[in-house]
Image (cartoon, helix red, strand yellow):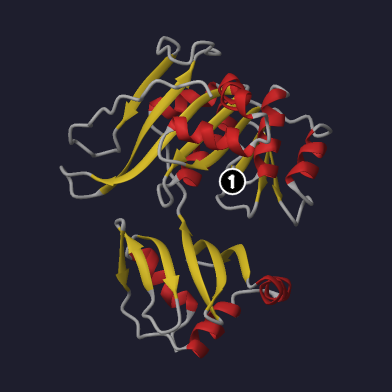
Amino acid sequence: MVTIEQLFRQAQQAGAAEIYLMAGRKPTARIGGKIKNLDYPELSSTEAEKILLEMLDAKQAAQYRETKSVDEVIAFHGIGRFRVHIYQNDGVPSACVKIINKKEGLPEELKALAGITQGLVLVCGKPHSGKSATLAALAEQMLAGRFMHLVTLESPVEYPIEAGKGLLSRRCIGKDTGSYKEGMDNLLHESADGVLIGELETLEAVQAALRAAKMGLVVLGTVNSVDADTAVERIAQLSGMEAPLQKTRVWKITKAVIKQKYELCESTGKFVYNCEILKNKKYICNMNSEKNKTILYYRGEQCFQRFTVLRLRALQPM
């Protein structure tokens, strides 16, 4: 029977971003933006359950039995780190596994954002676009450039981050602190200069991010959205603030939004990370005005195709 280590190693060597494991199907992987079968036989229900549940420790296995899903980061020596989401599918465990590849280096346009000392810095994009890798690289750049204390509140802790000149405290929700709110309460006593809150997709996470930004900390987070305006709109909707003021208040504390895309370069035939950066110079009272927004565009390394500049529509008040 195939081992999980063999599967993960082959997928990683093939340049996969995610691996999918389901009973009744061959193991598959997302490679270059497309889902492809790996060179392994179809998994039976017994095999799928055995190889997936064997990855879990006793506590994780108990959580799966109770909730029918579990989301953890698991490391295999000599292979790498993987974010493993196991869920029940027609009575049998299935999994979506994200391969965690550290992003080496940042373009100069993104490095410049490491100088931001307060407010929200968001990385938005579709799923599978590398948002978390960019966020971790930006956090590492901040720590490399100045002495600061950065606290992370993550569920789970995903990418490795070097502390550089600074101090780094990594706190996993449910393990190192009970909740985002509890983590924020503790932050007041930890003399933090910034906080990284991985995925801003829940009311509790968003409220923690906004609370930290209003305290004057720099806050890093990711949002699943197609553009900068939608990212801010999602944060506003999840914030719990009154509707007429939601979007305006979020823009007031937002310093930059990075829209990231993982797309095919027609010149090289390779998939590259491209991004657009929206910088908010100051609070925009007239949301129709373009004067206070600077838009920068970055092409992925070794991508020589002409970059199509899409004009961002004016941001409308809510």
Return the x and y of residue 178 as percentages of the image width and height. 79, 52
Q: Is residue 86 above or below residue 282?
A: below
Q: Quadrant of the N terminus?
A: bottom left
Q: Is residue 148 above or below residue 11?
A: above
Q: Is residue 174 above or below residue 119?
A: below
Return the x and y of residue 2 as percentages of the image width and height. 43, 84
Residue visible at 41% across and 84% down in the picture: 24
Residue visible at 29% across and 38% down in the picture: 301
Return the x and y of residue 59 as percentages of the image width and height. 73, 72
Return the x and y of residue 94 as percentages of the image width and height. 51, 75
Please name the residue that numbered disc 1 is placed on: 201
Q: What kind of residue is marked 1? A: Glu
Q: Furthest residue to the right?
A: 189
Q: Quadrant of residue 34?
A: bottom left
Front in this rendered view, residue 240 or 164: 240
Residue visible at 42% across and 67% down in the picture: 19
Q: Is residue 155 above or below residue 215?
A: below
Front in this rendered view, residue 314 or 161: 314
Q: Is residue 155 left or right of residue 278?
A: right
